Amino acid sequence: MARNQLARSHIIVGIPLALFLNGLAGISLDFSRALYLEGYGTFIFCCCYWVLWEEYSNFPEVHERKSPMVDTLLLVASAEGLINVVRAGADLTKVFWGLDLFLGSAVLWQFYTMMTNNYFDTDIGGWISWIRPANPLSLFRTPVERLHRDEYRYWLLGDGAQVATITAVLLLYPSFLRTRTAFNIIVIGGSLGQVYNVWRYVVVRQRCKMSSPIV
């Protein structure tokens, strides 16, 4: 049964990988601002895909309750968003729409996963338990039985805030997308943010692996 679940998980996470690689095949590399955005989109995908693969491999019981079709569709939509980023050239408006699709789909995936695992239940800390994961030190102080759930809360709040911000900029302040500041925020800020998220997940995975059973 565990082997079948693992095989199902690998298929689910393998489909968005195949789509993204296919999307990269049609990209022409020119040494301009577009090249930085292509590299950025690819880097973001690699970071997120590594976390996704580790998540499904190390916490299969968290994902076995979900519908494989719904799970796959949400991940495909997220991958499609990053495909649009790397194909947008130097058009920051298209890049932002691609990021909006990527992050919005990720938020729905997180929400769906949390719903099926009762991760929205509050604990003794009440609503402060939603704020605690934002503190990096919580990765080392939080009891391991809450650590994995708290990481989902961190993802949901962080990605949700980004979706709200990007959508607001697209609808209310589109001229900002033509500035150098917008470009720097996307490439530098986004890349550093993903490095931080990967580091967080490494800590979560290691602490959970050291504990039995994995939660």
Image (tube, rainbow, N blue to C red):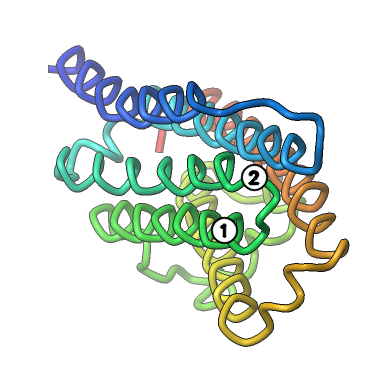
Q: Which residue is mark 1?
A: 94
Q: Nearer the viewer, residue 151 or 194?
A: 194
Where is residue 20, by image quadrant?
top left
Amino acid marked by disc 1: Lys
Q: Is residue 170 above or below residue 89?
A: below
Q: Is residue 122 above or below residue 81?
A: below
Amino acid marked by disc 2: Gly
Please tell me which residue is depicted at 30% across the width and 20% down the height of the picture: 10
Q: Say whether marks 2 and 1 touch (CB < 8 Å).
A: yes
**Upstream in sequence: badge 2 or badge 1:** 2
Residue at far bottom of view: 172
The kind of secondary structure element at disc 2 is loop
Task: For the C terminus, give its image quadrant.
Answer: top left
- In this rendering, would 70 be left or right of 87? left
Where is residue 30, by image quadrant?
top right
Q: Nearer the viewer, residue 60 or 50?
A: 50
Q: Position of residue 95 (x, y in %)?
A: 60, 55
Q: Is residue 152 above or below residue 79?
A: below
- In space, the residues marked 2 and 1 are separated at their CA atoms by 8 Å
Please tell me which residue is depicted at 43% across the width and 53% down the height of the picture: 106
Q: Which residue is mark 2?
A: 89
Q: Nearer the viewer, residue 178 or 193?
A: 178
Q: Position of residue 120 (x, y in %)?
A: 37, 67
Please tell me which residue is depicted at 69% across the width and 39% down the height of the picture: 40
Q: Position of residue 154 (x, y in %)?
A: 57, 58
The kind of secondary structure element at disc 1 is helix
